[in-house]
Amino acid sequence: MFKKDAFLTGLIPGLVLPFVGFYLYYLLFFNYMGLHSFIDHVVRINKAISVLSLGAILNLLMFFIFYQLQLDKSARGVIAATFIYAFVVVYFKVL
């Protein structure tokens, strides 16, 4: 399936982890409302991109784990995913 040290091994989790962070943020601070209501709320107050950006902090943790394990290609995949998110955030901030 995936090689241990491969670009996709870092890219795919790097693209998914910000959404996991978004969900963790919801669970920690807004679990009194439904997930759908929370998403509507952050979209309505124009904070969806900011909350999703907080989830990208998990990419930093994963990058350091790959770096410590000397999985350089996987670490590059995480960096690439983080840059993709950065471009998306800048794009939506400019709109």
Image (cartoon, rainbow, N blue to C red):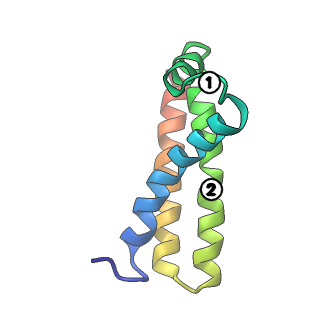
- The residue beneath circle 2 is 58
Q: Nearer the viewer, residue 4 or 92?
A: 4
Q: For mark 1, give the secondary structure.
A: loop
| Name of the residue lying farthest toward the front | 32
Whole-percent x and y of residue 8?
Answer: 37, 69
Q: What amino acid is at disc 2?
A: Leu
Name the image quarter holding residue 30. top right
| Name of the residue lying farthest toward the bottom | 70
Residue at the (52%, 80%) spot, across then down: 72
Whole-percent x and y of residue 22?
Answer: 58, 40
Q: Are marks 2 and 1 in contact (CB under 8 Å)?
A: no
| Name of the residue lying farthest toward the right | 29
Residue at the (40%, 60%) spot, across then down: 12
Q: Residues within 10 Å of mark 1 (few under 14, many from 20)?
A: few
Whole-percent x and y of residue 28?
Answer: 71, 38
User: In this rendering, is residue 1 above or below 84?
Assistant: below
Q: Residues within 10 Å of mark 2 (few under 14, many from 20)?
A: some
Whole-percent x and y of residue 9?
Answer: 41, 71
Q: Nearer the viewer, residue 28 or 21?
A: 28
Question: Which of the numbered marks, if any, corresponds to residue 47?
Answer: 1
Question: In which quadrant is the N terminus drawn?
Answer: bottom left
Q: Nearer the viewer, residue 58 or 74?
A: 58
Name the image quarter holding residue 53. top right
Residue at the (58%, 17%) spot, across then down: 41
User: In this rendering, is residue 26 above or below 80?
Assistant: above
Q: Could you tell which of marks 2 and 1 lies nearer the N-terminus? A: 1
Alpha carbon distance from label 2 to label 1:
19 Å
User: In this rendering, is residue 51 above or below 34?
Assistant: below
Q: What amino acid is at disc 1?
A: Lys
Residue at the (62%, 24%) spot, across then down: 47
